[in-house]
Every structure is written in structure tokens, then in C-alpha cells.
Image (spheres, rainbow, N blue to C red):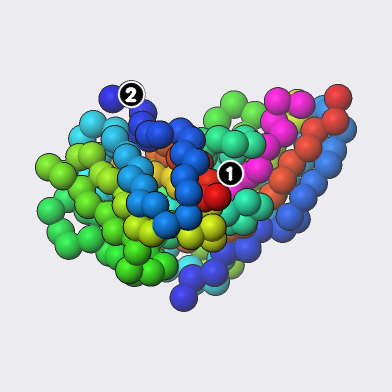
Amino acid sequence: GAGVSQSPSNKVTEKGKDVELRCDPISGHTALYWYRQSLGQGLEFLIYFQGNSAPDKSGLPSDRFSAERTGGSVSTLTIQRTQQEDSAVYLCASSSNMGLADGELFFGEGSRLTVL
Amino acid sequence: KQEVTQIPAALSVPEGENLVLNCSFTDSAIYNLQWFRQDPGKGLTSLLLIQSSQREQTSGRLNASLDKSSGRSTLYIAASQPGDSATYLCAVVETGNQFYFGTGTSLTVIP
């Protein structure tokens, strides 16, 4: 696609429910990142996928968070048993990673999650 | 661990002024540095990418410089306009493709 696409743009859920957030990166981009941005805060790294390599999960805040990337393209971030502190904007970004020096990062518009 | 700092946290200027936003980082072993803008409720939009071998990049009224040895980058905005009002973030990338973001500078350009 022309840009990074995320869905849903807004999600309101009840505490304890599971949610899935989807990211469709720019076609051909091998690197995909998930970040979380809480109100008025900076970006918090969650997870990074690079091609077929094992993902870097070092930023996932708890075992309720997981992500997968199917076929090296679309990624899904799953949050199980949501808590109110999970409320934030979840941002996805992709990069061509054609050599690190070329790795310009492009972001989607984000998925705003509200846990009641 | 890399730390990225942006000063000031907020800036308010009258329309037409030239301004400079600052970004500093603690580890100079970076591959590139990227400047973004973020409008309220939106994702980040890439403005400029400076590779480690470069010293500056220009796009329209924007000019970004990079001094790796001192761990600093500046974003210069010429002839500011109300439409430039946004939060500006810088990010550096190191080995392992990990991006480190600053907390941003919130810019308001007053008509």
C-alpha cells in the first residue's frame, strides 16, 4: 500500500476483554515496529520484526501482550485481559531496512485503545 | 543505553520567526537520525533523515544538521507558519535497528 495502515483507528473495550490491533506495513518493507504512546508521553518501544528473524520482544510490558507477523507482512498485536493502564495509542511503523543507513521509518495513524 | 533529549519541551513563537529545535543523544555510534512531526491525535510524519555520514539535510523551509561527535542535531525552521504547530520528535537508530526517540518539542506558531 501507499502507507502504513492500522485498524481499528479507535477501540473501546471493557476491562478484562482481549483486543487485536492490526498493522499493514508499506509493501516491501521488511522491518516492522510496534510502539505505545500514552497521553502526553513519549513513544514506548514494544516489539520489532525483521524479515524471518526472531522478533525482538524486549519492550513488551507483560505476558498479556503478544504480536505476530504473518508472511512477513501484516502484523497483529494482541492484548489479553485488558487493564485500564493499557489505554494508549498503539503505533505501528515500517522500514525498508535496505542497509541500516537507509532505514527511514514510516508510521501509521495509530490505534487508540480505551479500556473502561 | 542511548538517551535522547529534546530541549525545549515547548516553544511558542510569532508567525514569521525562524526557530531552532534541539536534539541531543548520549551515544554517538548511530547509523542515522530522523526528525518527525506529530499532529494531535495523529501518527508521526517523517520530515528529514540524516545518515551518519551526512552533516545536514534540507527540505523546503526545514534544515536539519547532525554533529555525531558532540551528540547533537538541530532542526531549523525558517519563516514559521501556524501550520507548523505540532510536536517535533527526533530519533536515532543504532546497531540492531533499535530506534530511540526523544520526548519531543511542542511548537506553537501564533498568527
Q: Residue at x 63, y 44 (%)?
A: B88
Residue B94: % across, % down: 38, 63
Q: Is residue B24 left or right of residue A72?
A: right
The amino acid marked with disc number 1 is Ala
- Residue B84 painted magenta: yes
Numbered tag placed on residue B64 in the rendering:
1
| Mark 2 nearby-residue class (10 Å; few <14, some 14–19, many ≥20) | few
Q: Is residue B73 left or right of residue A90?
A: right
- Subunit of mark 1? B
Q: Which residue is mark 2?
A: A2
Q: Secondary structure at mark 1?
A: strand
Residue A106: % across, % down: 40, 39
The quadrant in which the N terminus of chain A is found is top left
The range drawn in magenta is B82-93
The amino acid marked with disc number 2 is Ala
Are labels 2 and 1 assigned to the same chain? Answer: no
Q: Residue at x 32, y 40 (%)?
A: A22
Where on the picture, by quarter, is residue B73? bottom right
- On screen, A20 above or below B80? below
Q: Residue at x 29, y 59 (%)?
A: A66
Residue B75 is at least partly visible in this image: yes
| Mark 1 nearby-residue class (10 Å; few <14, some 14–19, many ≥20) | many
Residue B25: % across, % down: 56, 66
